[in-house]
Every structure is written in C-alpha cells, then in structure tokens.
Image (cartoon, rainbow, N blue to C red):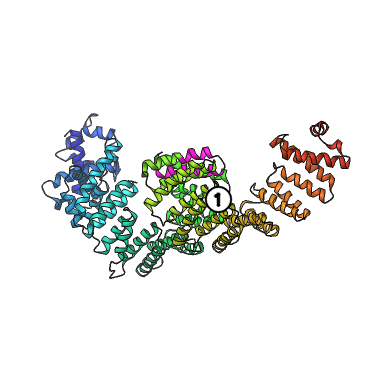
Amino acid sequence: MTNNHLLIYRLAELMLEKQQHIIALDDLFEDEQIGAFVRSIQIDSPYQQLIFEGVLTETIKEERVMVTFTVEGYFHYVLGEVIEQQAEGKGPVALKELLENNKLRGIIEGVEQCLVRDVENNDLSRLMWLIDEGGKALEASAYPLAQAFLMIEGHPKTEEEKEEASKKQIERVMDELLADPTDNDIEVLEKAIEKLESAQLNELVSDIYKEINNQINPDNIKKAVLYVKSVKHIPKEERIKKLDRLNQLEIKKEDEQAGSFYYSLGNQYDFIAEYEKAIDYYEKSLAIRLKVHGDQHPDTGTSYNNLGLVWSYKGEYDKAIEYYEKSLAIKLKIFGDQHPSTGSSYNNLGMVWNDKGEYDKAIEYYEKSLAINLKVHGDQHPDTGISHNNLGLVCYEKGGYDKAIEYYEKSLVIALKVHGDQHPSTGISHNNLGLVWSDKGKYDKAIEYYEKSLAIRLKVHGDLHPSTGVSYNNLGISWYKKGEHHKAIEYYEKSLAIDLKVHGDQHPSTGTSYNNLGLVWKNKGECDKAIEYYEKSLAIDLKVHGHQHPSTGISYNNLGSVWKNKGEYVKAIEYYEKSLAIILKVYGDQHPDTGRTYYNMAVIFNKIGNHTKAIDGFLKTLKIKTATLGIEHPDLGELYFRIGLLLMELKKHKEALEHFKKGFISSPDAGGFPYNMGVCYEQLGSKEQALNNYLLSAELRKKHFGLDHKATQTVISDAVRLANETGSIKLLPEWIKKIANDQ
C-alpha cells in the first residue's frame, strides 16, 4: 500500500472509530500511522498531494482546521474496504454490529460497497446471512442484488460483456434467494426489481420474473403479490391459468398486503384486456385501501387512477373521469399542485378528454402536466418528453399537423438526448412522427419514420412483441395509402401474427389487425374477403367490449362501408345506424366519430336519391367539423360543396349559393366553387355576378388543370355563352377571347 493510500484508509478508519465525518487536523498530527505524513509541509508529501488533487478538503471550524473527503461517494468506497478488512475472519456478525451500532454518515453505503466486493468475488455468505437477519441490514443487503449489474456502471468492458456479467451475478443471487424465500427475501427482491426497472434493464427484470414464477410457491399473500407480477412475463394461456389459480388463494384478513394482492391481480387482468375482472379486483383493492388507509392516501389514489384507466379502455369516459378526478383530489391534497404525481393525473385526464373528442379540454390538462414537468424536471426529462408527445397527439387529432410535428420533434429530441437512438421512447417518437406525416399525405416520409421505429423495436423487443406489431401495422397503413395493397397486406399479416401469438384471438389488438386487413381487401375490391375480416373484428369487439363500446361502433361502421361498396345500401344503412347509436351514446352528437357516421349515411342517401336525408346528414357533419376544426379549415370545403350541389338539385339556389360561398372561404383555390356560384347567380337572375364567377373559376381551373381539361372547357364555354347573351364580350380576358375566336 502506498503512503497516499495508507493516509486515505487510516483517515477512513478514524472516521469509523470516532463516528465523525470530519476530523480535526490536530488529531491526525498525533496519529502514529499517518502523523508524519500530515505534519510534513513538503509539496510532494502524501497529505499535500491529496489536498492539491482534491481528494481531501480542509475547512475552518471554531478556529480549528478540519479534514474530510471531498467526494462522499469515494469515501463510501474507501470505507467499504476498511469495513471489509476489519470484518475479515469475523463473519457477517461484524457487519451487522456496524450497521446497528455505528452512527457514522455513510455507514450503510460503506457496508454496501463491502458486499459488492463479496458478490464480485462470488462470496455470498455475508450477503445471505444479512438477508436472513433482516432489520436494518435489509437496506444494505438489497443493494448488491440491485447492483448485480455493477459492471455496467464502473468497469471498462463492452456493453455485451457488461450485460453478460450482470446476468451471471443475478443468477447467483437469485438461486440463493429463491431456494426457500422468506418474507425478508421477498422484500429484498421487490426492492431489487424496482432498482433494476428504474435502470431500464427490462430483459434482466423479465428473467428474474420468469425465475420467480418457476420457483416461488405463493403460499402466503406477501409471496403471492410478487408472484402475480411475475405472471406478466409468461405466455398468455399459461398466464390465465395461473391467475385463475391465484384467485383461489384464501385471504384471511384485509390488510395492506391483501390490498396489494388484489391490485396486482387487477393489473394483470387489465394487461390481457379482461376488463370486467380487472375492475372487480381493483374495486376489492380499493375497498381494502379505503378501510386500511382512508380516502386521502397515495395507495387509495392509485386505485382510483387505475379504475379510471380501465373504464377509459371500456369507452366509459365519464366514469373514467370520475375516478381520475378522485385520484387527482387526493394527490392535490397530499402532494400539492406542483408534484410529478399530480402531473400524471392531469395527463390521464387529458387523455380521456382527448378520447371524448373534447380537444381543447384535453389540451388544458396536458398543458398543466407539461408545466409541472418543466418546473420539476426541466426541458430534457423523459416525463417532459411524454407531455410534448401527448400535446402532439391532441394537435394531430384536431388536424393541426404542423403543430403536432413541432411537439413530436421536441419529444424526439428529448428521447435521443436522454435515451439514445436505440430506446423504446425514441421508437415511439419516430412512430408518432410517421403518423402525422402519413396524414399529411407524405407517405414516403412517414414510412421512413416508421422503419426507424421498427428497427428500434426489433432490436429492443424482438419480432414477437406488441410494439413491433404496432410498427408493422403502421407501415401497412402507409403502404395502403400509397395504393400498394399487396405490401400493406404483407405488413398487416405480420402484425396479426404477432397479435395472435402474444394476445390470442380475442384481444383488441388482434381485432385491430383484422379490421385493417378488412380495409385493404375492401379497397382491392374483394368485398367478401373484407367482410370476413370485419366480422372477425366485430366478434372480438362484442366479446371484449360489449355492444356499447366505440370500437364496436367502428366495426359496425366498417361493415356498413363494405356493404355500401357491394351496392347493398339497405344493409349498409342498417350497420351505419348501429354504429351511430353507439357513438351517440358514448360520445354525444358533437364528436368527430359521430360526424363521420352521419357523413357515411348521407353518402348512401345521396346515392339512392333521398336528397333531403342526405343534406341533413351532411349538415350535421358540417356542424361537428366546424366546431372541432374551425370555420376556415380546408376539410370543410368538400362538405359545403356536397350540400350546395344537393340544394341545387332541389332548386334551392339561394341556399346553395350561401354554402358555395362558405366553402370557397375554406378552399380558395377550388375552381368548382365559383363555377357553381355562377350557376346559382344565373338561376337567380344576377347575370353580371354569374359571369364574374365563371371567369374566376376559369382562371383557377386553367391554373390547376390546364386548358385542355374538360372542367376548364366547360366553364369557358359557359362564360362565353353568358358574355354573348349579355353583350359583355369585352369583359372576357384575351386568352378566353382567343379560344372563342378559334372555335
């Protein structure tokens, strides 16, 4: 040992002995081992070197020079070695005595460092003894398990070597812990898993849970809680069997553990979309937590929150809001309005208001959540990224694609900075940017983002993970929109294969895959094949969600659309009406999905010549879209145009004219509006205004279609005709006069 090391370790020994984190320089002068080093004023003496290098720091306290370690973490490391030396040959008892009797700040961390060295050297005897002893030692004994991947943080190895070393360390400790786990062991495991999850070592966590599932016999509630969590990491069929067996576990008393057990069961049933069972267990957990903790406890708030989540999945949005608000009230009282947990509640309320189609209200809650995240975490934190992402989502739903891209890109920047380019969060951001670029009609750009997302998910999750399935699905959508139906089917079938393997044939995600395959087969003109897939999707919706869920409404709507394509208009209206009944009940009469259904029904009524019902449907759609998108949104133009044409059919030219005028405001480059305005003015006897609109339409159609297009030729012909009738040839532009003369 060098003189420098001797001084450092002796100083740590004295601190341990005196139970002081800072020691007077005078006391060091008198020490037999290091006194000479400390007294020397030579610049190359050990003490002066350590002061100069910043390892030790001098301060003045009550006119005395005091010495301490500059970096507390380094002190913990040195203290660990000192403790290891002092405990050598004395067994774990020596460590336990230190933990129980010594008040030195950093004593637990020092023991932890000692135990880490044990784990590195494959010596688990002290660790396991301390685990069995429990008490204060528990805090320290959890550490080596949680840090079994310590090579990741401190050793010069490749990432692959670090991960492999981690797994081996985990396996050694796990074998000991799971041989015959005590309640103390369970606590250690829970703490260790929590730390591993926070370090995002998901694969290691999955391996631990699988091992737990293989070895732990859930013969009591404490074991059962951890066992339930482990069930998530096994195949679905086996998972359901084990969950059903756990249901039979006799609960003898209603205490905190029982509440946690029921909560965990609810969580697992929630994960596999067994929502009724999830609600049942969440409510059992809530009842116990209300009894044990009362209505102002964080665990009670968590139960309210998860009940809100499941009711949201079921499409019962008002019920979801009721539970979310109860959870929020608890958090506001306990944590205040600037706490991350409160921000999470604001975020959840934002999501459910978004699902209800109340986008402005959703934005209000999302912005509250973002404000908290910015204040608490700053602008480069994962939670801040999530807030940006969710605001992007609601802007996307509102049709504000450029604003959505702005938020999504902020989220992506954070994900790249915090997690790097191979993390699930980065994959989500790429995916969402793909969504919005797809809806902007930039399909190649969307595919570029989707493929980046897919590459990450394949690397992180593999080719049989739900997230990978989502990427395949979204790529299918973009290829479908590009008109590459065979490529779309290829991706949709990959997504379906994952859903069937992971979720089975009765899960909402599987239903979505069936639905999308139905859509692409419909557009290929294979209506019977489309109906086959749509009916499979509907069957899942009815089984999982019931008769009054939005997804069920979508399935009815899609079946209506394919029967419309087959020319079976009566059957199509039957499905559309079923869809409309659900949507009106769930969302009310001002939701975008309600508008879409009114629109689809109006199209059919138009086809069968029922112009009055068609106009009524289009007007209802227009009212909803205007409220949602604003009066000047380009999507409104098509509705105004359709309504105007139908009113013209009914000889209501004055009303038609008003709709064409409004449509032209939202779509000022569309030559069809001024042309039909001209027709209406002519029918109303305003020939001068009619001619002006024909000429405006001619200019726009020439610009967009060219002179040879039928639509351009039609409006030129009407302009020349009306100019001749009114003696207004001189008003015609030269290019039209030339065409008229040539003819």
Element under label 1? helix
Closer-to-camera residue (1/267): 267
- Percent coordinates x, y for residue 561 in the rendering: 57, 54
Q: Is residue 378 visible?
A: no
Q: Is residue 444 magenta?
A: yes
Q: Amino acid at mark 1?
A: Glu
Quarter of the picture holding the C terminus: top right
What crowding class fits label 1: few (fewer than 14 Cα within 10 Å), some (14-19), or many (20 or more)?
A: some
Closer-to-camera residue (29/582): 582
Task: Tell me: residue 241, above or below residue 31.
Answer: below
Residue 242 image-quadrant placement: bottom left
Quarter of the picture holding the N terminus: top left
Query: Start and end of the magenta stretch?
Result: 421-450
Closer-to-camera residue (135/636): 636
Question: Is 550 left, or right, of 289 in this rendering?
Answer: right
Q: Residue at x 24, y 41 (%)?
A: 165
Q: Residue at x 78, y 54 (%)?
A: 654
Q: Residue furthest right?
A: 727
- Percent coordinates x, y for residue 56 in the rendering: 27, 38
- Percent coordinates x, y for residue 562 in the rendering: 56, 53
Closer-to-camera residue (77/477): 477
Q: Which residue is mark 1?
A: 397
Q: Is residue 626 magenta?
A: no
Question: Is 196 left, or right, of 171 in this rendering?
Answer: right
Q: Main secondary structure of the magenta part?
A: helix
Residue 710 image-quadrant placement: top right
- Percent coordinates x, y for residue 668 in the rendering: 70, 43
